[in-house]
């Protein structure tokens, strides 16, 4: 499958069922994935990630009954981030070409889930906000097994309580889904879990970011 066909498959998955999962190792390369993983582990070891909040705006609520992950926003300030942002920009353009989504920019952050952490079922954007349109999660974990927990549980967009997919957070695995339509949940992790989340947006005014690296 060539790259054009690969993007066709992603667009079809988003259009037909609202989500798709795929391995991006061939595109990004194992060295880049390893560099991103090392960067995130170093941040975690320095306690440089901040507890994530729930809600939008300048003062999100930190509710540990809903989510327990810690995050650090990316600005493309390191060589691995620059390379990753190049891929995100290519994906933005290809999705716009195929699905006419009007995506204008993206934002991304690292996330760490320690043992016992989770994120209850939610959607990434409210209907009609025209902000976050497509969500992407890239996983950065070695030798992840089902008993390690931490899977991304996907709910059917036609029936929000019906589970239709389960994505293990394996190295190089990506989940891509429509932010307003796909309800999802991070199940409790039983070992430290590393990931990177990105949102493709229709708005043009950047929001203030905290814990920027």
Image: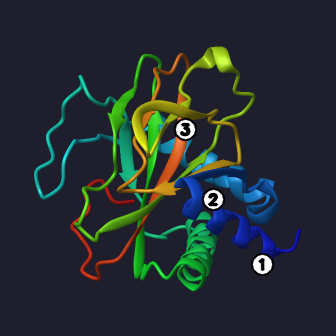
Left or right of 33 on screen, residue 122? left
The answer to whether one can see residue 163 in this image is yes
Question: What whole-number distance in Å separates the C-alpha atoms at marks 1 and 3?
Answer: 29 Å
Query: In this picture, is 22 found above or below 70?
Result: below
Near-viewer residue (135 or 33):
135
Write down the quadrant of residue 170 in the picture: top right
The answer to whether one can see residue 48 in this image is no
Q: Earlier in the sequence, mark 3 or mark 2?
A: 2
* Residue at the disc numbered 1: 4
Left or right of 59 on screen, residue 128? right
Callout 1 crowding tier (Cα within 10 Å): few <14, some 14–19, many ≥20: few
Q: Nearer the viewer, mark 1 or mark 3?
A: 1
Residue appearing at x 79%, y 53% in the figure:
30
Near-viewer residue (148 or 186):
186
Q: Secondary structure at mark 2?
A: helix
Question: What whole-number distance in Å separates the C-alpha atoms at marks 1 and 2?
Answer: 14 Å
Q: Earlier in the sequence, mark 1 or mark 2?
A: 1
Query: In this picture, is 173 found above or below 32?
Result: above
Q: Earlier in the sequence, mark 1 or mark 3?
A: 1
Residue 101, position as x, y percentages in the image: 45, 78
Residue 190, position as x, y percentages in the image: 53, 16
Image quadrant occupied by the C terminus:
bottom left
Residue appearing at x 31%, y 31% in the figure:
67
* Residue at the disc numbered 3: 194
Q: Secondary structure at mark 3?
A: strand
Q: Nearer the viewer, mark 3 or mark 2?
A: 2
Q: Secondary structure at mark 1?
A: helix
Image quadrant occupied by the N terminus:
bottom right
Residue appearing at x 70%, y 21% in the figure:
145
Residue 148, position as x, y percentages in the image: 61, 18
* Residue at the disc numbered 2: 13
Near-viewer residue (159 or 105):
159
């Amino acid at each position: 499958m060539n790259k054009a066909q690969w993007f066709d498959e992603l667009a079809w998955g988003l259009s037909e069922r609202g989500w798709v999962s795929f391995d991006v190792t061939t595109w990004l390369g194992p060295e880049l994935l390893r560099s991103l993983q090392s960067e995130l582990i170093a941040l975690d070891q320095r306690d440089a990630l901040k507890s994530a909040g729930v809600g939008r705006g300048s003062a999100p609520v930190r509710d540990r009954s809903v989510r327990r992950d810690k995050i650090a926003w990316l600005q493309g300030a390191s060589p691995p981030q620059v390379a990753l942002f190049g891929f995100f920009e290519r994906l933005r353009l290809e999705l716009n070409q195929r699905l006419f989504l009007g995506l204008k920019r993206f934002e991304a952050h690292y996330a760490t889930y320690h043992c016992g952490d989770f994120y209850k079922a939610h959607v990434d954007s409210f209907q009609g906000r025209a902000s976050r349109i497509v969500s992407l999660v890239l996983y950065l974990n070695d030798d992840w097994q089902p008993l390690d927990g931490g899977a991304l549980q996907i709910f059917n967009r036609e029936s929000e309580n019906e589970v239709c997919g389960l994505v293990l957070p394996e190295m190089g695995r990506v989940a891509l889904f429509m932010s307003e339509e796909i309800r999802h949940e991070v199940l409790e992790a039983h070992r430290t879990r590393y990931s990177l989340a990105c949102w493709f947006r229709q708005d043009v005014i950047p929001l203030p970011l905290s814990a920027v690296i």
